[in-house]
Amino acid sequence: MLRSLFVCVSVLGASQAFATDWVVDATGAGSSFTTLNQAMVAASPGDRILVLPGDYPAFQMFKGVAILGLGPSPDAVKIARCDYHPLQPLVGYDSSLANVTLGGSADEDSIALTGNELAPGTLTLDTVVVDGAVFLRGGSTGFYLQMSNCSVVARPGEGFAGESMWFGGIGNRLDVHDSRIVGWDCPESTPAIGAGVGLRLAPGTQARLTDSVVAGGSGLGAGVDGATALVGSSGSLQLLGATSVQGGHASLTAAGGAGVDFGGTLRSGIAIDVTGGSGGTTGPAFAASVPSLLPVDPTIVVTPDRDPTSGPFAVASGETIGFSTATAAGSTVLLIGFGVDCPPPSASVFLPLSPAPMLLVGGNALFATVPASTVGPLFGIEVFAQAATASPEGVLLSGVVSTRMNLQ
C-alpha cells in the first residue's frame, strides 16, 4: 500500500475499504468488546478496530487489521503492550496502529511493542507514543515498518541489548518521519545499567529517517559513558530533511557517545545535524564512515503540522491542507488519492477531497480544501504522502509522511 514508486496520499477508508469496523470500550458501555484481544478474535484481515478512550491490557496483533484510537490525543487510549505476530494473512499483510499509547508498568511490558521472526508485510505506526521499548525483527526479506509522528522513549534498563528501539534484518525496511527515538539516561543510583542506545538497526536493514530526532542516553553518574544514538553494522541508511542525531552526554570523567556508528552505506541530505555527546572526551559525530551527500533531498511537509504527542489536529470545512517539498519547483511528483471515511456510530460515508483522486501533479507544492461533512464530526482521518525527485542517481524517494486529523 505504501510501496509505490511515486507519491501515494491516501486516507483510511479511501485507499482501501474496510470490511467491518469493530468497536472496543474498556467500560463495556459502548461495546460488548472490552479488550482488544476479544475484537482481534472476531475481526478478519482488512477490518478496523476502533478503540474508545480507556486503559487496556496487553494484546496479540495476529491479523492484518487497522487499530485506531478514538481519543483526542494518543494518551487517551493506553495499551499495556502489543505482541505483534501477524498470521492472517501469513504474508502480504497490511496492519496499523494509530493514535494510541503503548506501555504498562509490569515487567513484561518493558518492551511495549515486540515481534520476532516477522513474515513479509507492512506495519504502519501513526501518532503512537511508546512508553517503553520496541523490538521488531523481520525473519525474512519483505517486512516494512513505517513510523510517522511517533515517540519512543524507554525507561532505564528496558529494551533488547541496551537500546530503546531494535529493528530489522536482511531485506527489512524502515521509514521514520517526524518522530523521536530516545535512549534512556543512566540512573545515578544504578550506574551498572549504563546509558541506552536510541536506535539499533540489525545487519542488512534498509532505513530512512526524515525530519526526526534520535538521541543516545546520557551517563549521569561519574564514570558512565554516554550512549551512541544510532547503531548499525551493514545495510543502508539515509538521513533526510531536518533530521537530528545526538550522542549521549557524560560527566568530565567519562566519554560522550557517538552520534552515528553505522558500517553500511550511509547517505544524507544537506540539512541533517549529527553531533557527538559532550564529556571528558567528546563523542564523534560519525564513529565509522562519514555519509556521502545526496544530490537532492526530497523531503515533504504537511501543513498544518503538530507535535506527535498532541494527537490529531482538527480541521474545519473550507480549511486548506498543504503538501510541499524542499526541492526545486517542478522536480517533485505527487500522486494524490484521498477522501474521508466516517466510522460508527454514523453511517459509513465517503467524501472525496479536492483535487480529484489519483491526480498526478508536477511541482513542489499542492493544496487541498477540506469538504463539508453532512454527518457530523469525522475522526481519525489519516493522510499519507511521499515525494519523488529525479536526480543523477535516478528517482529518489522521500520518507513517507503521515498526518492524522479530525474534521469538525
Image (cartoon, rainbow, N blue to C red):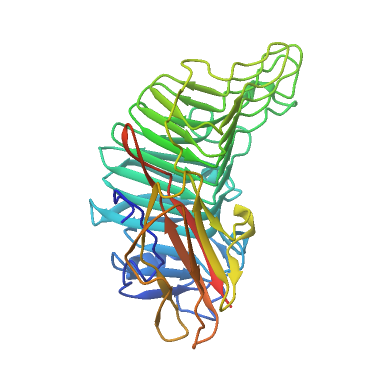
How many labels sit on residues?
0
The answer to whether any part of residue 57 appears in the image is: no
- 89 to the left or right of 366: left
Q: Considering the image in quadrants, where does the C terminus appear?
A: bottom right
Please report the residue visible at 50 percent of the width from the left and 53 percent of the height from the top: 324
Expressed as whole percent of the image width and height from the top left, the position of residue 306 reads 62, 56
Q: Is residue 143 above or below residue 322?
A: above
Q: Nearer the viewer, residue 29 or 127?
A: 127
Q: Nearer the viewer, residue 243 or 23?
A: 243
Q: Considering the image in quadrants, where does the N terminus appear?
A: bottom left
- 406 to the left or right of 6: right
Please report the residue visible at 51 percent of the width from the left and 45 percent of the height from the top: 326
The answer to whether any part of residue 121 appears in the image is: yes
User: Which image quadrant for residue 251?
Assistant: top right
- 245 to the left or right of 173: right
User: Which image quadrant for residue 315?
Assistant: bottom right
Q: Is residue 227 above or below residue 97?
A: above
- 32 to the left or right of 310: left
Q: Nearer the viewer, residue 319 or 231?
A: 319
Q: Nearer the viewer, residue 406 or 51?
A: 406
Expressed as whole percent of the image width and height from the top left, the position of residue 265 reads 38, 23
Q: Is residue 85 above or below residue 238?
A: below
Expressed as whole percent of the image width and height from the top left, the position of residue 4 reads 29, 51
Q: Is residue 352 above or below residue 291?
A: below
Expressed as whole percent of the image width and height from the top left, the position of residue 189 reads 74, 26
